[in-house]
Image (cartoon, grey):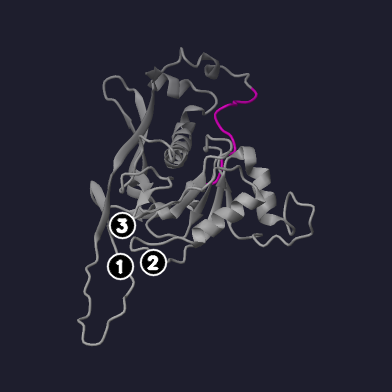
Amino acid sequence: MTTATGNFAELLWPGIREIWGNTYNDYKSLYTQIYETVKSDRAFDKYQGVTGLPLAGVKDQGDSVPYVDPFQGFQKEMVNQTFALGSQVTREMYEDDQYNYINGLPKMLARSARQTEETIAWNVINNAFNANFTGADGSILLVATHPLVGGGTYSNLLATAADLTQTSFEVMIQQIMDAVDDQQLKINLTPKTLCVPTAISIRAEKILTSDMVTGSNDNDKNVIRGKCSLVVSPWLTDTDAWFVVTDCPNGLIWQNRRAISFDRDQHFDTETLKFKMSWRSQCSWVDPRARFGTPGA
């Protein structure tokens, strides 16, 4: 579709006091606060899991030392995708525009790119309970039965689904502190960021910043005050689901193949002006221990 003078006739005449609807205040980048951003230099990248070694056992006198092998773990392949959007206008529309609206198209494209990045990134979280979106281990992002390479399972799902409260958040933190690796050795996993939708943002802020325990008549000190940073995302679609990002490496990955670029050109015969932007990237998760959560009660 090409924007011509007939589409924007009002922009051809003087008398309009203000052009509105195409620019608003936008959120600062949110997904970069929970994703690990990496640079890619190929069509796809693979992330290969490996295990450490299990616990040692008692060796009786004269017996041989038991030897064990580490395991090759799960593999995640991330294929970079191309995202693009453009707009085109006739030369006449560009020349006759009285309000410089057409010259604002690159800025509008940039805004679209930013919103697209946020939407893509947060949809990974929105699909955390969706059976159609599985990770390297064959499980969805949040589940009680992630397989361990060395045998057994672990959970990054709150044992009993619950809305965000002081108590449920404390239970979540305890569950994170009990995390194990693929050989069931304890790991020092730390909660970093509480992610919530706008619907429960005020409650989340109270829990993280109040000096005393919220929702209690007792004068107890709030020991989880400042335990995590807070990210409130309007792109989270479930109004009572909440999530905790941990410091687990190779967790949520945003992979950049090519940065956002903007171009403009003019078609020789039609003299149509074209504006476009594109980039290449991919995002997903590798190690599910980077994310704990619950769909809410």
| Residue located beneath label 1 in the image | 52
Distance in Å between CA atoms under marks 3 and 1: 13 Å
Mark 3 or mark 2: which is in front? 3
Question: Relative to 31, is 135 on the left or the right?
Answer: left
Q: Measured along the vertical axis of the image, is residue 15 above or below residue 160?
A: above
Q: Is residue 246 magenta?
A: no
Contact, mark 2 vs mark 1 (Cβ under 8 Å): yes
* Residue 17 x %, y %: 65, 24
Res 123 visible: yes
Return the residue nearer the eye: 213 or 195.
213
The mark that comes first in sequence, 3 or 1, is 1
Q: In the image, what residue type sits under mark 3?
A: Gly
Distance in Å between CA atoms under marks 2 and 1: 9 Å
* Residue 209 x %, y %: 69, 56
Most common SS among magenta residues: loop
Q: In the image, what residue type sits under mark 1?
A: Gly
Residue beneath the point at 79% across and 59% down: 219
Residue 185, label in figure: 2
Q: Secondary structure at mark 1?
A: loop
Res 47 visible: no
Q: Name which quarter of the figure residue 185 lies in.
A: bottom left
Question: Relative to 216, is 34 on the left or the right?
Answer: left
Return the residue found at the far bottom: 61
Q: In the image, what residue type sits under mark 2?
A: Leu
Residue 151, label in figure: 3
Q: Secondary structure at mark 2?
A: loop
Range covered by the magenta-colored residues: 17-29
Mark 3 or mark 1: which is in front? 3
